[in-house]
Amino acid sequence: MNIVIRTDASVQIGSGHVMRCLMLAEELREVGGNIIFICREEAGNLRRFIENKGYPVKMIRHEIPHNDPNFDLQKADAEATLNIINEIDAEIDWLIVDHYSLDEDWESRIRPRVNRLMVIDDLANRRHECDILLDQNFHVEPEMRYASLVPETCIKLLGPRYLLLRKEFIAEKRRLKPRDGTIRQIMIFYGGSDPTDETMKALRAVQELPLSSIQVDFIVGQANTHKNEIRRICNDVPNFHYHCQIDNMAWFMAHSDLSLGAGGITMWERCYLGVPTIATVVADNQSDSTSAVAAMGALWNMGWHANVTEQHLADMINRAIRSPQELIEMSKKALHLMDNDNDRQRNRVVEELIRRSRA
């Protein structure tokens, strides 16, 4: 299969879209997929990171005029994408798009040039012209969210059972032992770029707590603008450990007894491994899903980031330390929520892409 993936990363939008597309690309490559990424050249893009994973990256380089009310972003992006696709000189079996700024307008311009089109979304706030739609988030009535937003023939892959996971997560899940509620290791990760600076907030919170016997791992992405300051502070505290742009996230999650993080894609990864979590909502699209997971008892939701203080975080960490049984129950509910098969050999999304290709 020849597959083109259109997605972006930047300081503003973070790295989540690219990271979940890389997870999908990894499994598609294992079944013979030839994958090319198309990304816009913005500050904080992950071109080198993607290339280091072994995938060609074609860049869209024209600037977006912010003061031109007549500029059509989707038309310009579609034209640039089509120019790149035409240079590939091969039949495109699948175009996969993971981008909040693109909808059916963009997709209808691209669709005549590709055999099939898949959209990854979790906002349910715009129409799509696609063959498959993937939304990994948990919602009470997932089918209703997209009832009028996709064609009737579109296959909808909805819910955490379709979570895109790297194989390292599946491997760690098989080795996972029941948690005993005792906190020996805390993991702090708020996304690759952390534009709202939650990592520094959490760092200041744990500095004020008597945690000398607990290892605290601070994980940041290359696009985090405060990474040097975070590294400097960690170097001065024996039990604080700094990690940048890691490749073994699953290991850290599996070995952590408590996690502080955002309510995005990594929330589902933490749930998959049953990590007790104190979550902060750092983007509008995280609010509903984070609240839904909290209502199931699978994490503690701090709410909107602007309302979360260092003291709030410190109080919640203290509560976690004092409440081992609550953490045990939280872990069990997170694992139950994911409804994942430990022994699955292939991602369900990949299975559907292969099945649809053969239809």
Image (cartoon, rainbow, N blue to C red):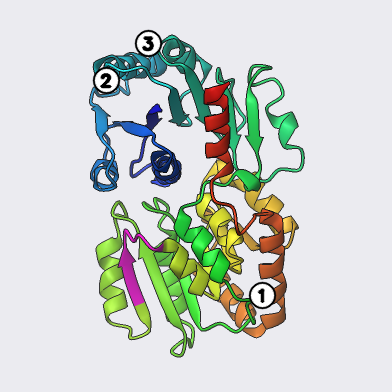
- Viewer-proximal residue among 281 and 84: 84
Mark 1, Cα crowd under 10 Å, few <14 / some 14-19 / many 20+, is many
| Magenta stretch contains residue 146 | no
Q: Spatial distance from mark 1 to mark 2, Cα to Cα? A: 51 Å
Question: Mark 1 or 2 closer to N-term?
Answer: 2
Question: Can you identify the residue that label 1 sits on?
Answer: 327
> On screen, 19 above or below 173?
above
As shown in the figure, which amino acid type bears the numbered disc 2? Ile
Residue 93 position by quadrant: top left
Q: Amino acid at mark 3?
A: Asn
**Secondary structure state at the residue bearing disc 1:** helix
Q: In the image, what residue type sits under mark 1?
A: Leu
Q: Which residues are magenta?
A: 241-248
Separation of residues labelled 2 and 3 (CA atoms): 31 Å
Judging by the rendered image, the residue that carries numbered circle 3 is: 70
| Other residues around mark 2 within 10 Å, as few (<14) / some (14–19) / many (≥20) | few
Position in image of residue 307 (x %, y %)? 56, 57
Whole-angstrom CA distance, mark 1 to mark 3, is: 53 Å
Q: Nearer the viewer, mark 2 or mark 3?
A: 2
Q: Look at the image and say whether residue 246 sits in the magenta stretch.
A: yes
Residue 242 position in % (x across, y down): 32, 71
Please identify the quarter of the rendering in which residue 76 is found. top left
Q: Secondary structure at mark 3?
A: loop
Q: Left or right: 199 with respect to 148?
A: left
The tag earlier along the polypeptide, 1 or 3, is 3
Q: Nearer the viewer, mark 1 or mark 2?
A: 2
Q: Which quarter of the rendering shows the N terminus?
A: top left
What residue is pinned by disc 2?
Answer: 88
Disc on the earlier residue, 2 or 3: 3
Residue located at (43% from left, 82% from top): 215
